[in-house]
Amino acid sequence: MPKSRASQVSLVDTPYYHCVSRCVRRAFLCGEDKISGQNYEHRRQWVEDALLKLAEVFAIDVSAYAVMSNHTHVVLCVDKDQALSWSMEDVLGRWHKLFKGTLLTQRFMLRGEREQMTAADILTVEQTAAIYRQRLYDISWFMRHLNESIARQANQEDGCSGRFWEGRFKSQALLDEQAVLSCMAYVDLNPIRAKMAKTPETSNHTSIQQRITAARQGKQPHNLQAFVGNPRVNMPKGIAFNLKDYCELVDTTGRCIREDKAGHIDNHQSPILERLGLNSEQWLTLTQQFEQHFHGPVGSEHMLNQFKAHTHHQRIHGIKQARALFASG
């Protein structure tokens, strides 16, 4: 029986979640259908554009993503504090970029109309805005809007109706740094494992390609969660690792995965692995078989037990894998 979304999300434990959506039809989301000969490659851009647009509206950052032929992977970071800091005008303005809202919220956003609203009208708008605020840091609303918009476009193009995605997207809580970084690399390396690309920089419609392209100009993509370096005083928001180290590690890992090019990861030359307390064997297992080993929340045994308590699970899967894969090397 599927678990409720509330039992899979605990912002007390982590803001990071790995979400996977899969297509239900034989016809691909993207790529070429070898049976019909129809090419759907352009739909990968639909997904990428829609995903990054939503990140500008929601209080949810995109940490990593990969758009594959019949499924998508995203690693999301919920920023609840940002949503709580928005004014009511900010909340309504963001919501109206995606939805019509109500007649009262539309009137409230028009200065001339707002002055004529009654106190009861304003109170109703405040209550509505409180609901919208919660939705703007809710991964279910984020993924729902992403998937529904793509389904509508695909159905229109295919001249049909009905379900395009599986009924529910899969969500995994990433409970610590080890889980977050290994899952990000797992997502970024999807095209290489699938033999759709040979290197991270040629992996189209992935976050790692965006990061490498921007890094060559000394920048970071504005629409992805930033790497902000190692922990320090007055730490800005972002991923607390060095971008250069991450890109180099993903590139090295990609070479290890490819059968035609041997690669080796030296623990002593990888600052990320050293800090995470992982050895190269654990890292390669995680970045190649992440979903095979973990079907629910991911993290150390201690973090999994905390998550179990906060979400009121009687038991939780993945303890044995956590002991093996997240133990210090």
Image: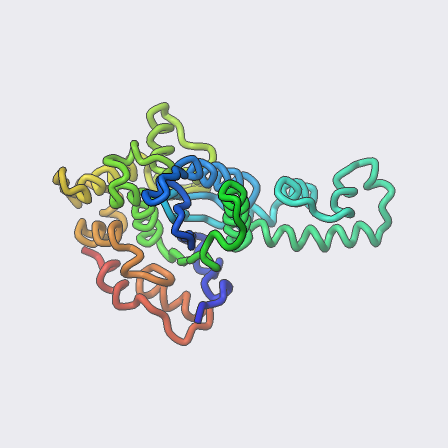
Residue most toward the front? 36
Q: Is residue 59 visible?
A: no
Quarter that holds the N terminus: bottom left
* Foreground of the two, 157 or 80: 157
Q: Is residue 41 visible?
A: yes
Image position, residue 231 (x, y; %):
36, 43
Residue most toward the bottom? 314
Image position, residue 50 (x, y; %):
50, 40
Image position, residue 267 (x, y; %):
17, 45
Residue name at image x 35 percent, y 28 percent: 213
Q: In the image, 210: left or right of 292?
A: right
State which quadrant residue 301 falls in.
Answer: bottom left
Residue name at image x 25 percent, y 64 percent: 323
Q: In the image, 257: left or right of 303?
A: left
Quarter that holds the C terminus: bottom left
Image position, residue 113 (x, y; %):
83, 39
In the image, residue 253 above or below residue 125 = above
* Foreground of the two, 300 or 259: 259
State which quadrant residue 248 falls in.
Answer: top left
Residue name at image x 79 percent, y 42 percent: 107
* Foreground of the two, 171 or 265: 171
Residue name at image x 47 percent, y 66 percent: 7
